[in-house]
Amino acid sequence: MKIKTFIIITILAISPLLTLLPNAGVSVHAFTYNGQRFVAKQLKNHVDVFKALEITDMGSATPMVPFNVDMVNAEETDEGEGVYVAVLDTGLLSDYLSYFPESMVDIKEEWGIGFTHDVFYVGEGGNFSEDGLFSYGPLRSDRGFLTHDEGNPDANGFGWGSGHGTHVTSIITGFFFSRGGQDYWVKGVAPKVTIIPVLVLDDWIVFDPDGNGYFYSGGTDEMVAAGIRYVGDLAAEYGVKIVINMSLGGPSPTEIIEDAIDYAISQGVIVVASAGNSGEEGMDWPGAYPQVISAAAAGWTQEYGGGYYNYYWWWNDVPEKLNTKNKVYDPITGKTYTNNWHVYLTDFSGRPNPDLGQTWRVLDVSAPGAAIRGPYKPEGPYGEGFYAVWGTSQAAPHVSAIAALILERYPWFNQKDVEYILDRAASSVPMKGGRAYVSDVFSGFEVVTYTWKGRDAGYGFLTLDKAIGAALVYARAHPQPITSPLTVK
């Protein structure tokens, strides 16, 4: 059977690393999927990595703060109640309760939904892919929000679906993690928000008359637009505050998606999207729309221990002052390098490209998007595990979570209000341009150099404390409007 891959709307995450239990027999597999390089460790034996689905008591789990939550100064926050975050993505893995037990994470399953198409092999004349071999049926809204994995295979018995949406969700809420017989609760940025899983990125297996299989992963403009409008309808019907997180993007603007975004914003929804992973080639849409809050991907210069690797490096403490010197050791050359900051801009993070009509103002803020650890299904039959993932996909949920925490305090704020606040709250350190030395896990921890210019990271790096402070100042000048008539007695 031949499996070919195509991308429609891409998932904006790259280079995941899967990590499992220590000292368990593993075999390492390296493979490429959708142009992305993966390294997966498969357990040789059936080791119980996750607890049973009926987890109810998290009292024995040790709370841990990952570096990315520490970077945005959300380590002490236990808020978000009453605000919804709609994650428009690949849906959730079928065993999502293993990572998001009901006692810790509120997922609005009854509002969860999935949009997709039936895909057909038609030979020449199709309109689904560039080679014109496929067509797709009308948009369907009965897909459900679970991805196609081993626990929820598609009609052909395949479970190649992605863990992308699960990983993105874990950044917002936190997740359950077990290693070496010890249970941990890894903190998220806004742990008390309610998640609405909306599947707008799917996977398909299509067979030609000769039995050759073609594997597709992504989403159409119609799927994404339908998901956005669905959330807008929820906000209008139930009068709730919702933030949309879109860790996805495409190479060009489309009217159907922009119209849906404008509709959702008109219903009071806050819309956040990734900037894209195309680096200097430009930003992806919908992140490049000026009315959307866009997120670039930053990193920590002390990733992987700054050259002194320890598995638990991702629980290391991040200094409160990010503009302090730090050293990175190169075990290959024996040299030590000095950084002036703890924050850098990744080379893949999409920058505004004037040739595409993108001004520097369309890129809003930067957030952690390098080596972010979380639950992720390996792309292929390699078991279960946790990935460290790089991408603006991972930056966006940090921003969405901070936006949700602002809405919890000031529910009358709209899209323009929140975007203005986040832009003003972003720190210029070190985002006015600079250079950073970082230990590269993909080359044996060799030190690599990252450089960036001016507004490549938008208004700068976003932290929760500064965002809340900026929101307070803004609220004093823009108090909640009085909507009911006054009675003079």
Image (cartoon, rainbow, N blue to C red):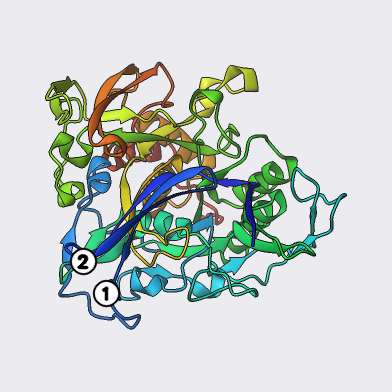
Q: Give the x, y percent position of residue 341.
A: 21, 25
**195 relative to 410, above or below:** below
Residue at 47% from the left image edge and 61% from the top image edge: 380
Three-letter code for the amino acid on which mark 2 is drawn: Ala
The mark found on residue 482 in the picture is none
Which comes sooner in the sequence, label 2 or label 1?
A: 2
In this rendered view, identify the residue nearer to me: 261 or 439: 439
Residue sitting at the far right: 125
**309 relative to 52, above or below:** above
Q: Is residue 410 left or right of residue 76?
A: right
**438 relative to 69, above or below:** above
Give neighbour class at mark 2: few <14, some 14-19, many 20+ (Cα, 10 Å): few
Which of the 4 quarters of the picture holds residue 163?
bottom left
In this rendered view, identify the residue nearer to me: 414 or 254: 254
Three-letter code for the amino acid on which mark 1 is drawn: Val
- Provide the secondary structure element on which disc 2 rests: loop
The residue wearing badge 1 is: 47
The residue wearing badge 2 is: 24
